[in-house]
Image (cartoon, rainbow, N blue to C red):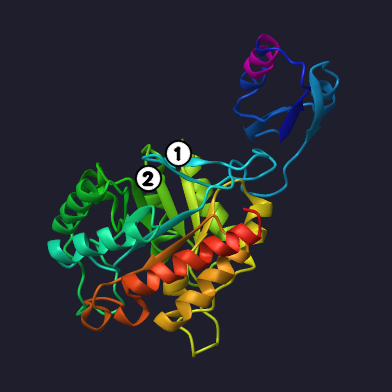
Amino acid sequence: MIAVLKPNTTKQQRDNLITWLEGQKVSVHVSEGHDYTVLGLVGDTSKIDIELIESLDIVESVKRVTESFKQCNRKFHPDDTVIDVGGVKIGGGNFCIIAGPCSVESRDQITEIAKGVKESGATLLRGGAFKPRTSPYDFQGLKADGIELLLEAKKITGMPIVTEIMNANHLPLFENVDIIQVGARNMQNFELLKELGKTGKTILLKRGLANTLKELLMSAEYIMSEGNTNIILCERGIRTFETYTRNTLDLSAVPMLHELTHLPVIVDPSHATGAARLVKPMALAAAGAGADGLMIEVHNDPIHALCDGAQSITPAQFKEIAEKVNRIREVMGQ
């Protein structure tokens, strides 16, 4: 349920109403806009008298939210959420580009790539330390050592870092990581999501291989239900019957998610297509669709990459993509 308060409502009046509502055994989330304040009620609202609340002088309107996702619902929070990660803003018209290798392989490798992508316009550095692989015999990442190398690259470039978590037991290793990524395979690892919800970290939540947008939003809700509202959603392609691409990039998810939720939405064209030559057109299309950012795999030597070399682009190719993405956003007035 949401209650929209009138513009002239005082803080004392608002606080009095919140206190009364919390006495009805519901939690109240406050969202303040330019001309209004929205109170989002979470819990058993079936016994709350809507007509009684509507009759209050300070209340503009009251309505029930029928969707099962509440806190990430745009009805609860009409304005876009803007997330600030080390001075890099994401959402609400702020565009970010996350770039770096699929996997951290060595100090020289991650440092060289980090310097290159920063010079070309990247605002955050990605790199896998713990790698979920389809085959148990494939390279699984450098783990804790990989995180240390990412932190070294951060010191050199000043770029906040993004890396994926596989297990809640690894959380102590992520203390200095700026954005914790939840990969597609863990999107519905609800115990992990709940633990991440207890942190103050920004979470980059990727859509699962065969999950609906509602399921993605419900996973975000798991994180938010534990108190963490710093979430970035990522469309990275879904599995269909098509075999020419690794996955099918669902760009319609971008405007639909913006309609449904206030959370920022970015796109990963690398994992979606699985082919370096397709990253550029899909990145440009994602920018045109209104994405709040991109996540692109960049490697200084893709042919010899230990992980996902086929979908990794070179720093020179990344520079070209970043420049054209910025032009598209200029044309669109973003």
Asked if the magenta segment contains residue 13, the reply would be yes
Q: Which residues are magenta?
A: 12-19
Q: Quadrant of residue 242?
A: bottom right
Question: What's the residue at 32%, 70% (across, down)?
Answer: 315
- Cα gap from disc 2 to disc 1, whole angstroms: 8 Å
Question: What's the residue at 51%, 78% (across, down)?
Answer: 239
Mark 2 neighbour density, 10 Å: few (under 14) some (14–19) many (20 or more)? many
Quarter holding the N terminus is top right
Where is residue 97 shown, x and y percent of the image?
A: 43, 58
Asked if the magenta segment contains residue 229, the reply would be no
Q: Main secondary structure of the magenta part?
A: helix
Say whether disc 2 or disc 1 marks the residue closer to the N-terminus: 2
Q: Disc 2 on helix, strand or loop?
A: helix
Q: Is residue 182 left or right of residue 45?
A: left
Q: Amino acid at mark 1?
A: Asn
Question: What's the residue at 52%, 65% (across, down)?
Answer: 325
Q: Is residue 5 above or below residue 208?
A: above
Q: Is residue 169 above or below residue 309?
A: above
Question: What's the residue at 74%, 29% (across, down)?
Answer: 3
Dot label at residue 196: 2
